[in-house]
Structures are given as structure tokens and as C-alpha cells.
């Protein structure tokens, strides 16, 4: 993760995700992800966040529009690295999650 204004970059490795899907409107599906980290990256998690989750905004056909880190449900001063986004994208593009997105539309 990268904190705005900081030169320190950490890398989180996700062990698992727990999704919650919600249809926002005729265009967007919000996928909130809670996650577990692999033991190797638990020390890399930002210590100044209270409840870090991931918001993935998708179209009704499952295309990702945005991947946003949230702290207690609000925008925070962090962003994900390219490697973290790759892990999240792979999960969202999995057939099981794509089926859930289509069912939510």
C-alpha cells in the first residue's frame, strides 16, 4: 500500500476475501471485500487504519471501474499498489464472483 505523501511502499498478500455485493443503480454494482492477509504480509498492513476494507465498483457485466481502499467505510489516505490490484482483480474476475455480480444485476 502507498500512503499519500509518503515514500514508503508496502505490499499486502491476500490469503482470502469475503465479498458483500450491492446493486447501486442501473449501471454499478458495489463489491465490498473484507480480507485475510497471508502471515508474511500481516506486518506490512498499515497500523494507522482502524477497519481497512476494499470497495470494488463494477459494471453489471462484471468489469471493474475502480478499486478503492476504505477505512471504516470512508475514503482514506492510502492507495493499493499494482500488485495488490492484480490480486483483487483476479478475485473479482473469478467465475464464482462474476456469477454473483450477474445475479445481483
Image (cartoon, rainbow, N blue to C red):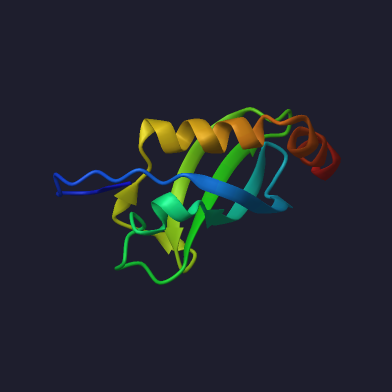
Identify the image quadrant of residue 102. top right
Picture mark count: 0
Q: Nearer the viewer, residue 17 or 54?
A: 17
Q: Residue furthest front?
A: 40
Q: Is residue 65 above or below residue 16?
A: above
**12 with respect to 20 (left or right):** left
Task: Tell me residue 50's x, y (percent).
Answer: 40, 72
Residue at 60% x, 53% y: name it: 33
**89 with respect to 48 (left or right):** right
Identify the image quadrant of residue 91. top right
For the C terminus, give its image quadrant: top right
Residue at 71% x, 31% y: name it: 94
Residue at 44% x, 38% y: name it: 84
Task: Tell me residue 1's x, y (percent).
Answer: 33, 46
Task: Tell me residue 56's x, y (percent).
Answer: 56, 43
Task: Tell me residue 2's x, y (percent).
Answer: 27, 45
**95 with respect to 7 (left or right):** right
Q: Is residue 39 above or below residue 14?
A: below
Q: Nearer the viewer, residue 45 or 73?
A: 45
Q: Is residue 35 above or below residue 9?
A: below
Q: Residue furthest right?
A: 103
Q: Residue furthest bottom?
A: 50
Residue at 71% x, 51% y: name it: 21
Amino acid at each position: 500500500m502507498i500512503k499519500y505523501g509518503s515514500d514508503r511502499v508496502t505490499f499486502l498478500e491476500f490469503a482470502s476475501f469475503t465479498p458483500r455485493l450491492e446493486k447501486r443503480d442501473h449501471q454499478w454494482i458495489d463489491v465490498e471485500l473484507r480480507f485475510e492477509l497471508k502471515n508474511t504480509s500481516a506486518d506490512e498492513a498499515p497500523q494507522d487504519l482502524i477497519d481497512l476494507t476494499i470497495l470494488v465498483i463494477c459494471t453489471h457485466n462484471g468489469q471493474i471501474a475502480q478499486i478503492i481502499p476504505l477505512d471504516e467505510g470512508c475514503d482514506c489516505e492510502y492507495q493499493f499498489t499494482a500488485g495488490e490490484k492484480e490480486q483483487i482483480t483476479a478475485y473479482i474476475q473469478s467465475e464464482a464472483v462474476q456469477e454473483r455480480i450477474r445475479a445481483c444485476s
